[in-house]
C-alpha cells in the first residue's frame, strides 16, 4: 500500500508527501521533496547544524551535537515540543548523524538511533527511535542556484499513540519543517548573514 498525498494546494507550493510501509519497522516511511530558492551548499548546513536549526525549527525544544566521532559523523540529541495541544507529548531522539557529499553536488545527512551512555531516557520525554532517515540536497535541474530538498523520515514516536494520530502528525511535521526552514532562510537573508 502506498499513499501519496499532494498537499501543495493547501500548505506548501510544490510539495508532496509520500507514505508507505517501512521495511525496517512496523511503521510508515515518509518521503517528501520540495524546491528551495537557495544553492545546495548554503541550504545543507542550515538543515542540520545546531547553530542554525535550533533558531528556526519550531518543533524543537533542543537540538545539539553531544559527541563528534569524526569530521562527518556526530551523535546528536533532539527534544521536540508537545504537539496537537498536548495530544502528543515531547519526544527525545538520540541518533548518529553522518554527512556525505557525492559528485554533482549531492549532499546527504544519514541518521539512525543509537544508545549513548550519557543520554539515558528520562521521565520528561518519551524516547523515540529513528530508523534510516535523512535529507538530501542537490542542485535543481536547470537551475543550480536552487535546491531540490528530499527528506526520508522513519521514526517510531514511542508511547501509546493511535496510528491515526501518527498519520496526522508526521506529514504535518514535514510540512512545518519546510515552512519553518523557508522562514528561517528569509530571516537569515534579511539579517545580511
Image (cartoon, grey):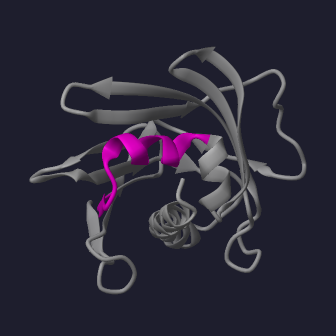
Whole-percent x and y of residue 80? 71, 57
Is residue 157 shown to the viewer in this render?
A: no
Q: Is residue 22 left or right of residue 103?
A: right
Furthest residue toward top: 70
Whole-percent x and y of residue 108? 37, 35
Q: Which residues are magenta?
A: 33-49
As for residue 68 lying within the magenta part, the answer is no
Whole-percent x and y of residue 37? 31, 61
Q: Is residue 175 left or right of residue 35?
A: right
Furthest residue toward bottom: 10
Image quarter (top left, top right, bottom left or bottom right) of the N terminus: bottom left
Q: Is residue 190 above or below residue 104?
A: below
Residue 178, picture quadrant = bottom left
Which residue sits at x=18%, y=31%?
A: 104
Is residue 29 shown to the viewer in this render?
A: yes
Q: Nearer the viewer, residue 71 or 29?
A: 71
Q: Is residue 176 left or right of residue 160?
A: left
Q: Is residue 25 left or right of residue 20?
A: right
Q: Nearer the viewer, residue 75 or 47?
A: 47
Which residue sits at x=51%, y=69%?
A: 183
Which residue sits at x=41%, y=45%?
A: 42
Q: Nearer the viewer, residue 145 or 57?
A: 145
Which residue sits at x=54%, y=42%?
A: 48
Whole-percent x and y of residue 158? 67, 51
Furthest residue toward left: 142
Furthest residue toward right: 123
Amino acid at each position: 500500500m502506498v499513499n501519496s498525498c499532494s498537499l501543495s494546494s493547501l500548505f506548501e507550493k510544490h510539495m508532496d508527501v509520500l507514505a508507505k510501509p517501512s521495511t525496517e519497522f512496523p511503521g510508515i516511511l515518509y518521503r517528501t521533496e520540495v524546491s528551495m530558492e537557495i544553492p545546495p551548499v548554503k541550504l545543507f548546513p542550515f538543515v542540520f547544524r545546531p547553530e542554525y536549526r535550533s533558531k528556526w525549527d519550531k518543533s524543537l525544544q533542543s537540538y545539539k551535537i553531544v559527541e563528534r566521532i569524526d569530521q562527518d559523523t556526530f551523535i546528536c540529541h533532539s527534544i521536540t515540543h508537545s504537539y496537537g495541544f498536548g495530544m502528543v507529548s515531547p519526544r527525545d531522539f538520540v541518533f548518529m548523524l553522518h554527512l556525505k557529499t557525492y559528485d554533482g553536488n549531492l549532499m546527504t545527512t544519514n541518521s539512525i538511533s543509537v544508545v549513548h551512555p550519557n543520554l539515558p531516557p528520562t521521565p520528561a520525554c518519551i524516547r523515540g527511535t529513528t530508523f534510516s532517515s535523512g535529507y538530501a540536497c542537490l542542485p535543481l535541474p536547470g537551475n543550480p542556484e536552487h535546491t531540490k530538498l528530499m527528506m526520508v523520515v522513519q521514526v517510531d514516536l514511542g508511547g501509546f499513540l493511535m496510528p491515526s494520530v501518527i498519520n496526522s502528525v508526521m506529514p504535518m511535521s514535514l510540512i512545518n519543517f519546510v515552512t519553518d526552514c523557508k522562514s528561517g532562510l528569509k530571516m537569515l537573508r534579511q539579517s545580511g548573514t
